Structure formats: structure tokens, C-alpha cells
Amino acid sequence: MPEVLKALLVVEFPFTRSLGPVQSAFLTGLRERVVLGVRTSDGRTLVPPVEYDPVTAEELRDLVEVAPTGTVTTWAWNHAPRRGQPLDRPFAWVLVRLDGAGTALLHALDASGPDAVRTGMRVRIRWAAERSGTITDIACFEPYDGDPVEPGGHDGEFEDAVTGIMVPARLDYVYTPGRAQSAHIGALSERRTVGERCPSCRKVYIPPRGACPTCGVATSEQVEAGPRGTVTTFCIVNIKAKNLDIEVPYVYAHIALDGADLALHGRIGGIPYDQVRMGLRVEPVWIEGARHPDHYRPTGEPDADYESYKELL
């Protein structure tokens, strides 16, 4: 039975956004241990605040402070916290309607177990020791059996307000290729590039997909292509990627391998970035132990005629 291939992949990037006056006041307030909502024309107080009424779509600017205490409206137990979640031990995800608010705020509740959590229980904010103007300034909620806390009546005006935030976005997942891509990956370990031919239109797809995207029929006939190919189009990368030891600027291109009807991606090396062009003939460069080409370099052949690759753009 063939080996089932799998790989742990991570997609990660920082997401940066600017803040309008309402979100700026809300996050700055958290930094100062103040919780602000926004009041609608019919008297509702929305926490977290939004810039436009979800019912009427009118712009909202009337900020009002609410209490750091509230009531759990619903909850779910998280028995196995994941990286980056508020607590590193089992906890409850809760929706909490803070006193004075008309909507609920989602956050973590630090509780000893699911038997210690119930709808209707009273809780309060546990503030983070160090705060910078993000939702994580609320470290979590904790059970509370004391008297209600009165808000201070803050008007939402702050010095040194938070005007922007950067949120790291990350997705961890396990990828398992199917039959066609497993064969393609296996051939790459032998420094060969193998795709599959459609039995109907006869096009060769590299990397293979297991089915023809045009005809919709399964593919099984394996075809070796390349190793040389033609640059069909490209881009110049000027921003250095994290954990990628390649100096910028560099060129990333679509390369149509000889004998293939689908262009694949590859980095172009061995030539100044400003000399890469459409039609450039290239070949793969392998590094010992690698399972795919490190980059493609010029072959020294004359450029391919545009008519020979225009359908692969």
C-alpha cells in the first residue's frame, strides 16, 4: 500500500488596521480599565461598540461607560485550549452582558470546571497586568459574588488614544495530497516532474489535480514534462518574507514546462531581477536533499516566441 503523505502547514501574516473614533475609544478605554459601549437612538447600549447601528444603519458616536461586572448569558466549555487562546488551561467561552449593556461580549471565563459554570452566573473582568489597547487587555472573566459595580461615567475622551492595531492571523492545518499529487511529489524526490493527461482534451496538467478542470473527467495517465520551461509571466517581490532566507528584490514567476499545458510557480535566480522577462527559457536548480527545485535559472536559449505560450498566461 503506498505511503500516505501529509504535512503540517502554517499560513501566518500580520493584519494591520486603522481605527475609527468609536473603536479607538473602546480599545483605549480597555488600556485604562474602562469599558465603553455606544448608545443607539432607541436607547440600547452596544458592547463591544460598533460604528453603525446594526438595525437602522445610522452612524453611532454616543459613547457610554458600562460596568466591569455582568451576567453570563450562554457558555461552552473548552477542554483543550489551543495556542494563542486567552488561557493555557481548560476554561469556558462565555457571552457576558455587562451591567448597563444591551448586548453580550464574548470572552473566556476562568473556572475550575464545567460544573462551576452556569447561565445567569455573575462575573467580573480580570484585567491584564500589562495593557496596550487591545481586547487582550481583558485577560478573562472570573466568578463574582459581590455587589454591582457602578461605572464611572467616562465620556470616552482620552489622551494618547490608540489609533491602529496589528493582529497576527495564523492558520495551522494538516494537508494530505491525493493520489495524483502524491505521485507528483514522489517524482520530484527523483528530480522528475510528472503530471497527468486528460483523456478527453489531451492537456497535461502539472501539478496534477486528479481531474481535468476543463472537461471534468478523471485523469490517470502520467506524463513527464520539462525539465526546461518558459516564463509566461512574473512579479518582482520587494517585501522580505518572515523565515525565508532570500534577499529582496527577487522574481517569482509562472513557468510553463515543456510538454505541460498548465504553468507552475517558481523563483527565478541566476539573473538580475530586472532582466527577467516573458518568454525567458529556464531550467530547474536542485539542492541536495530537497524535494523540489530551489529555483529556476536561464538556460541560455533564445527567448520563446509569444505565440508558443500565450494560451498559458
Image (cartoon, rainbow, N blue to C red):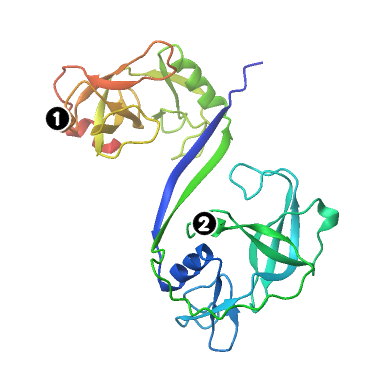
Q: What is the three-letter code of the residue carrying label 1?
A: Gln
Q: What is the three-letter code of the residue carrying label 2?
A: Arg
Disc 1, SS: helix
- Residue 38 is tagged as none
- Residue 131 is tagged as 2
Disc 2, SS: loop
* Residue pictured at 41% horizontal, 20% vertical: 292
Q: Where is residue 275 in the image (x, y as percent from the top left)?
A: 14, 30
Query: Taking 78 as reference, is 11 above or below it?
Result: above
Could you say which is closer to the camera, residue 153 or residue 205? 153
Q: Is residue 88 left or right of residue 13?
A: right
Q: Which badge, 1 or 2, comes first in the chain's sequence?
A: 2
Q: In this view, does 84 lie to the left or right of 200?
A: right
Query: Taking 215 as reference, is 39 above or below it?
Result: below
Residue where numbered disc 1 is placed:
275
Q: Where is residue 204 in the image (x, y as percent from the top left)?
A: 40, 27
- Placement of the N terminus among the 4 image quadrants: top right
Circle 2 Cα neighbour tier, 10 Å, few/some/many (<14 / 14–19 / ≥20)? some
Identify the residue at the far bottom of this view: 42
Query: Taking 239 as reference, is 204 above or below it?
Result: above
Q: Where is residue 120 in the image (x, y as percent from the top left)?
A: 79, 70
* Quarter-of-image position of residue 40: bottom right
Cα–Cα gap, marks 1 and 2: 49 Å
* Residue pictured at 68% horizontal, 75% vertical: 149
Could you say which is closer to the camera, residue 270 or residue 90? 90
* Residue pictured at 37% horizontal, 30% vertical: 244
